[in-house]
């Protein structure tokens, strides 16, 4: 891992990219940081180091709201200098780094190790190569761990420190890589093929938003392969039947700060020919007003039908269901999966509660016919007739369905009910009934924070919503001092308190899937 003192200024610059940089937006990477990344690098982030104009004003406004700081860049530098001093390795950013620091910077990760990005290459533009080299030499002399000089293809660099980092100046960039081999790979990239030369990368990064704070590129298929976690064959078949090939997918995220919000624009080709589209905002808005989170999906019935067809084709060996027998077996009991899927439209899930004991929620499905309601009734009868323990009928005030209790489910029953074109599946009766109730009580569409999220998304239909204070209250009640992540949570809490909402919308642009994530902030 790159952790040594020599890496500190580079890591400071990389942090600035993610938080306080400017630019991005499909810049010419052939002469920028991407030119130091080896072909096939899985993750790459690039931005500029010196905010100006409206972007700088927005970044500083966010810093004032979240951290009560006038200038985010100064805050980052102060924190980094303090951390370095605590480690016994002080760095004076203004004296040692600022004079030669350029505008562009980036970091690339070649692969994954135990699921985490590894083999990083950091490239930071310098305005004075000689001054940068002097800084490297001075730091190496002061280091308690030895550094040795090396040369490769005409490029001089140093290798050493506690983690054997390779550090040097290549063209007009300070480059820090993991080990001698990593630095040599960066040299090879600049003198031969690099990530910047790959059409796959170029096509993806061209979709990045103009004027972004930073752009993040991810080779989704490559990450899946490198993680060693193969997609379940049934899940892969479902994705492919939807026109999605995970092995070919890429994604780009662009960070766009506003004066009182942070927006992230995401595009992905999904490795398919056609991106999904639709609008489930009406259903999401009809979820209970006290929900701290809600997520919706449009055209759920079509997706379910494709999933059922694939599942029927492959069978369920673990449950003793052979191929091409699932649908026919259930149809013999009065459950027609094709009719059920064909009758369903959109889906939404909501969650509410401020403590673990009060936590609850439900899956809500809309239907254009009575087929789904009939199936709920038939399934309840089937379970009771087959002697399934813990099954109880639910039939009251126009609501019909059943509940199931078992030791595996815990203290609360699983409830499946339907009413007036809706089906709800909830953990206990109250949230399931709340998911069906569209006539009484307040809904999310009347909530102030939800309205703000919808407004911020503009023409992009909302697909997910999180109420900041509500989610924080739940987290505070569930994370105890004995938890491993308690200290991290305590450090993050002062910043999380300023999150009013998180809203996400999704759509399509030709063959690209698009999404917009907005974090609304309040003083």
Image (tube, rainbow, N blue to C red):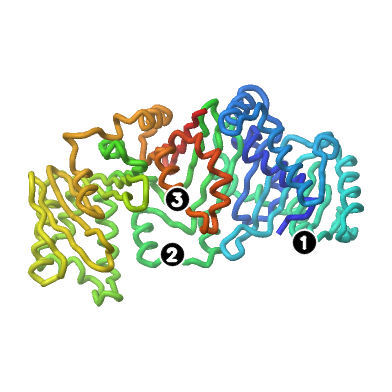
Label of residue 270 in the image: 3
Marks 3,1: beta carbons within 8 A = no
x then y, percent, for residue 293: 36, 43
Q: Are marks 3 and 2 in contact (CB under 8 Å)?
A: no
Which is more toward the observer, 494 or 9?
Answer: 494
Local SS, label 2: loop
Label 1, on which residue? 163
Q: Nearer the viewer, mark 3 or mark 1?
A: 1
Name the spot of residue 363 as percent of width and height, x first.
26, 50
Mark sitting earlier along the chain (3/2): 2
Q: Which residue is mark 2?
A: 231
Query: Spatial distance from mark 3 to mark 2, Cα to Cα?
Result: 15 Å
In the rendered image, is residue 54 in sight? yes
x and y, in percent, of residue 346 in the image? 25, 44
Q: Is residue 74 above or below residue 105?
A: above
Nearer the camera: disc 1 or disc 2: 1
């Amino acid at each position: 891992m790159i952790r040594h003192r020599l890496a500190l200024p580079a890591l400071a610059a990389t942090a600035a990219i993610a938080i306080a940089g400017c630019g991005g937006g499909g810049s010419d990477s052939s002469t920028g940081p991407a030119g130091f990344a080896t072909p096939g690098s899985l993750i790459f982030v690039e931005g500029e180091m010196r905010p100006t104009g409206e972007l700088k004003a927005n970044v500083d406004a966010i810093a004032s709201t979240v951290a009560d700081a006038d200038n985010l860049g100064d805050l980052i530098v102060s924190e980094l200098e303090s951390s370095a001093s605590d480690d016994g390795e002080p760095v004076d950013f203004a004296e040692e780094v600022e004079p030669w620091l350029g505008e562009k910077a980036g970091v690339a990760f070649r692969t994954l190790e135990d699921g985490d990005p590894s083999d990083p290459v950091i490239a930071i533009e310098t305005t004075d190569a000689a001054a940068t080299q002097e800084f490297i030499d001075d730091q190496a002399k002061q280091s308690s761990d030895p550094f040795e000089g090396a040369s490769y293809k005409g490029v001089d660099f140093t290798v050493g420190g506690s983690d054997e980092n390779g550090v040097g100046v290549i063209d007009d960039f300070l480059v820090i890589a993991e080990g001698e081999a990593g630095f040599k790979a960066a040299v090879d990239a600049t003198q031969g093929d690099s990530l910047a030369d790959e059409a796959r990368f170029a096509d993806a990064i061209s979709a990045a938003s103009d004027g972004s704070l930073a752009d993040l590129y991810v080779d989704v298929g490559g990450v899946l392969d490198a993680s060693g976690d193969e997609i379940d064959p049934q899940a892969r078949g479902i994705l492919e039947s939807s026109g999605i090939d995970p092995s070919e997918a890429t994604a780009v995220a662009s960070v766009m700060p506003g004066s009182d919000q942070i927006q992230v624009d995401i595009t992905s080709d999904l490795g398919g020919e056609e991106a999904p589209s639709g609008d489930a905002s009406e259903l999401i808005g009809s979820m209970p007003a006290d929900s701290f989170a809600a997520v919706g999906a449009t055209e759920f019935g079509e997706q379910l039908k494709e999933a059922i067809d694939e599942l029927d084709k492959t069978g369920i060996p673990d449950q003793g269901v052979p191929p091409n027998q699932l649908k026919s077996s259930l149809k013999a009991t009065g459950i027609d999966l094709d009719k059920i899927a064909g009758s369903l439209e959109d889906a939404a899930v909501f969650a509410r509660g401020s403590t673990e004991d009060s936590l609850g929620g439900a899956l809500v499905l809309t239907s254009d016919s009575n087929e789904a309601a009939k199936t709920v009734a038939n399934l309840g009868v089937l379970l009771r007739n087959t002697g399934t323990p813990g099954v109880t009928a639910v039939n009251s005030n126009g609501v019909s369905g059943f509940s199931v209790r078992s030791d595996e489910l815990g203290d609360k029953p699983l409830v499946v009910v339907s009413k007036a074109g809706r089906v709800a599946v909830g953990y206990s009766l109250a949230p399931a009934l709340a998911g069906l109730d569209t006539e009484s009580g307040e809904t999310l569409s009347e909530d102030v924070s939800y309205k703000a999220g919808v407004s911020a998304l503009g023409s992009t239909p909302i697909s997910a919503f999180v109420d900041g204070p509500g989610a924080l209250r739940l987290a505070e009640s569930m994370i105890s001092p004995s938890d491993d992540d308690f200290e991290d949570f305590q450090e993050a809490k002062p910043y999380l308190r300023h999150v009013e909402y998180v809203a996400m919308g999704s759509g399509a642009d030709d063959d690209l899937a698009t999404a917009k994530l907005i974090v609304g902030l309040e003083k």
